[in-house]
Amino acid sequence: MVSQKGLIGCLLLVVVALWKGATAETYKVGDDLGWTIPPAGSVAYSTWANAKRFQIGDTIEFKWSGEHRVAEVTQADYDSCSKDNPLGFYDSSPTRIVLTSNLTRYFICTEDSHCSRLGQKVTIRIGGDYSSSGDNDDDDHWWEWNGASSLSINIVAVILCTALVISFLSFN
Ligand SMILES: *[C@@H]1O[C@H](CO)[C@@H](O)[C@H](O)[C@H]1NC(C)=O
Ligand SMILES: [Cu+2]
């Protein structure tokens, strides 16, 4: 006999799983640091980015005060901090950018030598293999074990719950 509590718990699980699967995240670049001259060079932004799991549909938000800008550039221009041929240019804070593909994106600040000498630049890797990107415990959830896609977890949850509902109804 299936208890009513078990049934309710099961339905809650489905709601949580569906909600999680449908939720896109917004990431504030640099977290509390924001978009500014990093205290010890670009490592602040690479550390920040490496700890995230950017996915298609997520948004990154550049937020700053004072004299900063955001330019999206090619990888070559990123490496050389060249601001002459930006793919995108944003001069008001906050700037939000939606990640629409798995292609890596490169952003620099175009003010003075903020990129070239002070390291105000960030690389955003989307999708991809996160096995070497450090501690991601924050984003590991028990309903996404072993990296199984949330879609397949949702399907399993729905099937289990349907079976529970059917047995609940037939025993009552
Ligand atoms: C993006 O990367 C993720 C993770 O590797 C993958 O599951 C997904 O299919 C990719 N999407 C596209 C459109 O390539
Ligand atoms: Cu700047």
Image (cartoon, grey):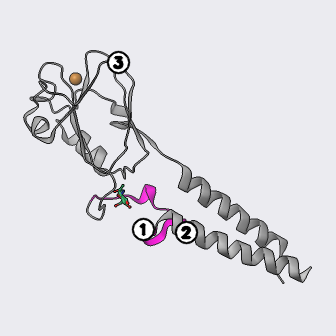
Of mark 2 and mark 3, the one earlier in the sequence is 3
Q: Which residue lies furthest to the top in this view?
A: 66
Disc 3 element: loop
Q: In the image, is 23 to the left or to the right of 120?
A: right
- The residue at which mark 1 appears reads as 147
Q: Residue at x 25, y 40 (%)?
A: 45
Residue 137 to residue 10: above or below: above
The magenta region covers 133-148
**Ligand 2's quadrant:** top left
Which is more N-terminal, label 1 or label 3?
A: 3
Q: Residue furthest left?
A: 80
Quickly name the residue at label 2.
153
Distance of label 2 from label 3 (alpha carbons): 40 Å
Q: How far apart are marks 3 and 1 (CA)?
A: 37 Å
Residue nearer the viewer, 13 or 88: 88
**Badge 1: few (under 14), some or many (20 or more) residues near its Cα, within 10 Å?**
few
User: Is any atom of residue 2 visible in this view?
Assistant: no
Q: What element carries label 2?
A: helix
Disc 1, SS: helix
Q: Position of residue 135 (x, y in %)?
A: 34, 59
Q: In this view, does 99 lie above or below 118?
A: below
Give the residue displayed 34% in from the left and 55% down from the top.
Answer: 127
Q: Name the residue under label 3.
A: 92
Q: Which mark is residue 86?
A: none
Instruction: Relative to 93, say whether 119 is above or below.
Output: below
Q: Foreground: 130 or 126?
A: 126
Label 3 crowd (10 A; few <14 / some 14-19 / many >=20): few
Residue at 34% across, 48% down: 101
Is residue 105 visible in the rendered structure shown here? yes
Rendered residue at 29%/46% (across/down) = 49
- Which amino acid type corresponds to the residue marked 2 in the rendered image? Ile
